[in-house]
Image (tube, helix red, strand yellow):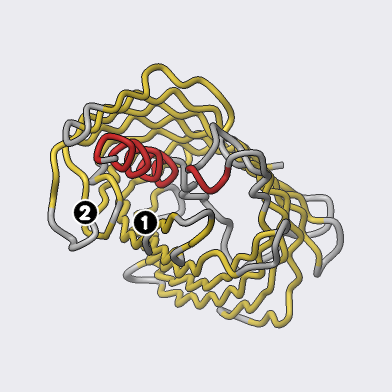
């Protein structure tokens, strides 16, 4: 029973590895017939897991990911979004000797529609509805034989401040709730905050924070415990040509429960049209 319990725990940890840190666009909608494509390559590693008490257990984890984010302005108020990623993951939980070696598959795929509620100088308020198609392997023992597609409702609030002498600063705050489509049960809460600084027309600096609280689940006599993650990114971007941007950054899971302590680097290229 102990071995079986370890396998259940390890499968649950794998489920958490595939929680997408989706790079949502900000609260500012695009103009009609304008859009952008952001392609990001990331490599991360982890040698420990935050357990149910928030303490760290040993593990061996690595992930390579290629992610594509797309958005397009349909009207002055409506913007379409899409987000998809392909991953290669290696995982060893040294507490239970459970291996998950060389997974190559798509992560969750998201399609969204964002509506601009309010827009004026320096201010943008939007709402977005998204459908998230379940990707990757079976998430955990509670997911055998069933889909875990999700729907999400997200609120976005952005505020910018422009100065001629010191450059521009902005923040973008978002909060989202997700429900499972198969059962209607509440799945998770997401709160994201981005702080940005643009010292010149060509350069920008981002500090992004992503937090996720996923509710506990009980089925078939098993309980998957509650999970929490707080992840932070810092990055620098440069517009080397009109509507062409390159961005380089560092990402780390700072604290959490039942989640890998993951750290790594990423490189993004932006194309706007």
Find numbered disc 1 in the image and state the secondary structure of the residue it sits on: strand
- Residue 51 circle label: 2
Q: Name the residue under label 1.
A: 206
Which residue is found at the position 37% from the left and 60% from the top?
225
Judge left or right: residue 131 versus residue 205: right
Spatial separation of the CA atoms under disc 1 and disc 2: 30 Å
75 up-or-down from 270: above or below: below
- Residue 217 circle label: none
Which residue is found at the position 83% from the left and 57% from the top?
32
Q: Which of 114 and 110 is in front in this view?
A: 110
Looking at the rendered image, the quarter that the N terminus falls into is top left
114 up-or-down from 143: above or below: below
Residue 101 image point, x, y percent? 37, 18
For the question of whether residue 242 can be seen, the reply is no
Q: Which of 121 and 166 is in front in this view?
A: 121
Which residue is found at the position 13% from the left and 50% from the top?
56
175 up-or-down from 198: above or below: below
């Amino acid at each position: 029973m102990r071995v079986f319990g370890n396998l259940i725990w390890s499968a649950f940890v794998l489920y958490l590895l595939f929680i997408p840190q989706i790079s949502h666009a900000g609260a500012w909608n695009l103009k009609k017939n304008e859009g952008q494509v952001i392609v990001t390559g990331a490599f991360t590693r982890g040698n420990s897991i935050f357990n149910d008490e928030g303490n760290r257990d040993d593990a061996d984890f690595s992930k390579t990911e290629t992610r594509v984010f797309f958005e397009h302005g349909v009207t002055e108020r409506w913007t379409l979004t899409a987000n998809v990623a392909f991953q290669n993951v290696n995982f060893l939980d040294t507490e239970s000797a459970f291996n998950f070696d060389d997974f190559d598959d798509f992560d969750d795929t998201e399609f969204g529609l964002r509506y601009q509620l309010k827009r004026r100088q320096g201010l943008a308020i939007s709402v977005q509805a998204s459908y998230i198609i379940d990707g990757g392997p079976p998430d955990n023992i509670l997911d055998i034989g069933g889909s875990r597609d999700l729907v999400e409702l997200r609120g976005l609030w952005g505020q910018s401040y422009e100065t001629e002498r010191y450059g521009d600063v902005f923040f973008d705050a978002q909060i989202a709730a997700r429900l499972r489509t198969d059962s209607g049960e509440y799945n998770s809460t997401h709160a994201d905050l981005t702080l940005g600084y643009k010292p010149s027309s060509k350069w920008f600096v981002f500090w992004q924070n992503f937090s996720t609280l996923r509710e506990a689940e009980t089925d078939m006599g098993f309980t998957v415990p509650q999970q929490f993650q707080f992840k932070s990114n810092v990055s620098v971007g440069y517009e080397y040509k009109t509507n062409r941007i390159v961005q380089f950054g560092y990402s780390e899971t700072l604290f959490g429960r039942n989640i890998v302590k993951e750290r790594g680097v990423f490189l993004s290229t932006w194309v706007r049209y």
